[in-house]
Amino acid sequence: MNIIQGLYYTKDHDWVKVEGEKAYIGITQYAENKLGKIVYVELPEIDDEFAASEDYAVIESVKAATDCHMPITGKVVEVNEEVVDEPELLNADPFKNWMIAIEISDQSDLESLMDSKQYEDLCNELCSKCKG
């Protein structure tokens, strides 16, 4: 499984890439694998504001539909329309194909997220429970 160093991660299997006051947000390979073939993505509008843990998007796959929870508080400044038009891009490369970019409202929110090592440990624990 691909886990990229330098990103932040959530227990809900989202990733966050911080560039100054801006953060790109997407789903991890673990989430993409669990969802299966993604067929629909609904993203918010530019200028929508979300608090950490609020629902900001919906992803539907052939297996299930899931709400995405905002990892950190912020205002949407970019929406990746490519993944709306071609949801399967999230299956092809979930790290390259981010979903939204936000202006970070509170940098301290990042402290509640995991680094790559912590996220790898979480995934290993989840995978060992699946096998057990």
Image (tube, rainbow, N blue to C red):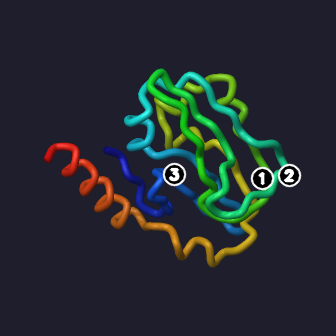
Residue located 63% across and 78% down the image: 108
Residues at badges 2 and 1 in contact (C-beta under 8 Å)? Answer: yes
**In the image, is residue 130 above or below residue 39?**
below
- The quadrant the N terminus occupies is top left
Judging by the rendered image, the residue that carries numbered circle 3 is: 14
Q: Position of residue 22 (x, y in %)?
A: 71, 61
Q: Is residue 76 left or right of residue 112?
A: right
The residue type indicated by label 3 comes to Asp
Residues at badges 3 and 1 in contact (C-beta under 8 Å)? Answer: no
Question: Going from the N terminus, do you reach mark 2 or mark 3 first?
Answer: 3
Q: Residue 110 sits in which quadrant?
A: bottom right
Residue located 65% across and 63% down the image: 52
**In the image, is residue 125 above or below residue 99?**
below
Instruction: Tell me if mark 1 has few (under 14), some (14-19) or many (20+) residues whose alpha carbon lies within 10 angstroms of its own.
Output: many
Q: Total of numbered circles in the picture?
A: 3
Task: Give the CA distance from mark 2 to mark 3.
Answer: 21 Å
The residue type indicated by label 2 comes to Asp
Instruction: Tell me if mark 3 has few (under 14), some (14-19) or many (20+) residues whose alpha carbon lies within 10 angstroms of its own.
Output: many
Disc assigned to residue 47: 2
Q: In this view, does 125 lie to the left or right of 65?
A: left
State the SS at label 3: strand
Q: Is residue 24 left or right of residue 49?
A: left
Task: Give the CA distance from mark 3 to mark 1.
Answer: 16 Å
Judging by the rendered image, the residue that carries numbered circle 1 is: 76
Q: Residue 57 sits in which quadrant?
A: top right
Residue located 38% across and 35% down the image: 33
Q: Position of residue 85 (x, y in %)?
A: 68, 23
Q: Residue 79 sits in which quadrant?
A: top right
